[in-house]
Image: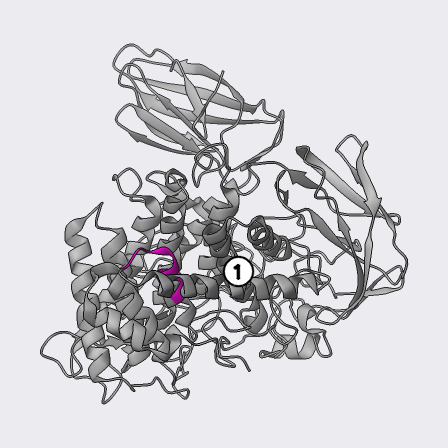
Amino acid sequence: MPRTTAPPLRRLPRLSAALLTGTLLLGGLAVAPAASGATAATTAVRVNQVGYLPDGPKRATVVTTATQALSWQLRNAAGTVVASGPTVPRGADAPSGQSVQVADFSSYQGTGTGYVLSVDGSGSVPFDIRADLYDALRSDAMAFFHHQRSGIAIDASLVGAAYARPAGHLGVSPNKGDVSVPCQATVCDYTQDVRGGWYDAGDHGKYVVNGGLSTWLVVNSFERAGRAGKGAALGDSTLRVPERGNGVPDVLDEARWELDFLMRMQVPAGKPYAGMAFHKVHDAAWTGMPLRPDQDAQPRELHRPSTAATLNLAAAAAQCARVYRPYDSAYADRCLSAARRAWTAAQANPAMYAPSSDSTGGGAYEDARVTDEFYWAAAELYAATGESAYRDAVTSSSWHTSADAFSPYGFGWADTAALGRLVLATVPTGLPASDVARVRASVTAAADGYLSRMAAQGYAVPVPADGYFWGSNGEVANDAVVMAVAGELTGDARYRAGALETMDYLLGRNALGLSYVTGHGESAAQNQHHRFWAHQLDASLPHPPAGSLAGGPNSGLQDPIAAQRLAGCAPAACYIDHIDSYSTNEVAVNWNAPLAWLAAYAAERASDDGGSGGEPPASACAVTYTVTNSWNTGFTANVTVENTGRTAVDGWQLTWAYPDGQRVTSAWNATVTQSGTAVGARNTDWNRTLAPGAKASFRVQGTHNGTNPAPDSFSLNAGACS
């Protein structure tokens, strides 16, 4: 099993709800079985269900037993054929177990909504072709981390009422932690404040080895956008986080929530193994489902320090020292101090490995080879300081010249040498030019390998046929990161095309015809394994929020649901959208991190600074504001916003300013907040989407000082309304 897999059976299942049954036949073709809560593939024409960029690749895969080329037609929303051509027969596709052909309509660069690709009498689901295609996903994929925050109330004004919850694990009954957590027996004789951070996956555990990698990717996304001149799209007030408006890019605010936790996991000075990082903190025993974090009554435990965790801390904190310095130099200094102490401690304890047996109540995340973590941490410390000791650690590492730094299975929490290469390839250091050239060549060589694999497969997936293991979708997204960086280094458009085509796979062009990202695509996963986003178990609880990435096909079938319902599946079809299938359908920070990285990359446009940031795109709109009742010091008003643009708005915020000191006291059918004279109204779950020509109405009640003039201007998602 590849080293990038999570340990087997790391989740405790609880059987419930309807199970996946049956096999659908389309034109005599065996198609993936339908998953509970998700629509089976009802068409043989598999597309990116969100759509395609006008200047990007546009390919679809057609499941068919035909051996001769077929004709394809692209029709717009009016049914007019706007492009046509022949498919390319590919024959047997080993990972999917299907016979396929490929339709390439990349030459069409028109824009619009509601396109359908038809092949041999079968039509795809409708999709869009537009430049702002990925703006909403950029926001949603990053919002995942705010949803997963521990130690803070998740506010309805930011996430909607369905996803709001009290703070978890702050020692408020019935919680036992995380403000004063004891160690497991024999590990330590004191308690540690380890509040905050992100819940790692579908349970309530927090892991330094996964947290370090995920934080690095989130911050690296901001770094890359800055190098591309598109940093404003990830800047302040671009995400739905409580820190927005503080002058710091929201992506860095989000990552800081995890960075603070990682540094709290460092063993204090004066204690045995000072400077090392505790490997993880989680419940003493597995909890059942569903269960909100604030309802978790299990005792919490710190697990023994590990070299791998310590080096994750060193790498992430050193990156922090570089990237945060322009915004908070004191915090950057704190990060650098923690990174230095972690590096020194890891050097003194180079072989403290987390045991594979430590998997009660949380995943083991065992890793008995940490030379790659040493290389990654040294690269980040060298990039942060330029000091010769760290340079020597980089150049003396076997990973610095190894041909295996980029493995066929991509990078992951147990394989981090590639991260060191990406740092050295993109961040100016004092390495000789020949060394930098060789490192950069290794990045492009890895990307070439992924492109070759994609070209050889019917679904253009960068992973090998035996690469469908636990978290395979994260592996796919990680490979896309490497291709995107290769494009940055070379300017070669092939790499951008490859990175974008991985998004096609994640969003529906796959063996199942299913989008693995909640809320994005006509037929998308919605029952991912999670203790609070558990609608399949309890109808009063929500589905996962939009932008959450399912782990994806796992041929190991490492949970009872998958083993029972997917026996005999082709590797790329070993997935079921069932909440109890933790080995195929869990969420995790280290899978959403590369998705967020990739979504931000895909959302950039050459013609501007990346659009309207992480929020949904600005749209043409019209607003009617009518005071329906007024009395001495109070009033009610009805507000109607109409989408007068040509594309749907998926998620909206209407903003205005009151001209004479009015204050909103309550609202209906929208979440309304006010700061000074500025007012913002956000959609609820049920009126989130505004199709072209559609309207949404809500009411506000407030107070006034004797006069009550109406606002004179409104903006929808930062775009002015008429």
Tell me, yes or no, if residue 186 can be seen here: yes
Q: Position of residue 517 (x, y in %)?
A: 57, 55
Q: Position of residue 477 (x, y in %)?
A: 53, 60
Q: Nearer the viewer, residue 285 or 455?
A: 455
- Give the residue number, with chain letter if any, for mark 1: 477
Question: Looking at the image, which residue sits at the far left?
Answer: 270
Q: Is residue 344 left or right of residue 568?
A: left
On-image quarter of the N terminus:
bottom right
Question: Looking at the image, which residue sits at the far front?
Answer: 434
Mark count: 1
Q: Quadrant of residue 94?
A: bottom right
Crowding at label 1, few (<14), some or many (≥20) Cα neighbours within 10 Å? many
> Residue at the spot x=25%, y=65% of the render?
381
Q: Which residues are magenta?
A: 421-429
Residue 43 lies in the magenta-colored region: no
> Residue at the spot x=89%, y=60% of the render?
66
Q: Nearer the viewer, residue 212 or 715?
A: 212
Depicted 690 relative to depicted 163: above or below: above
Depicted 307 relative to depicted 222: above or below: below
Q: Nearer the viewer, residue 381 or 175?
A: 381
Q: Inspect the image, locate mark 1, and give the three-letter code of the amino acid beneath it.
A: Ala
What colouring style does the render use?
one colour
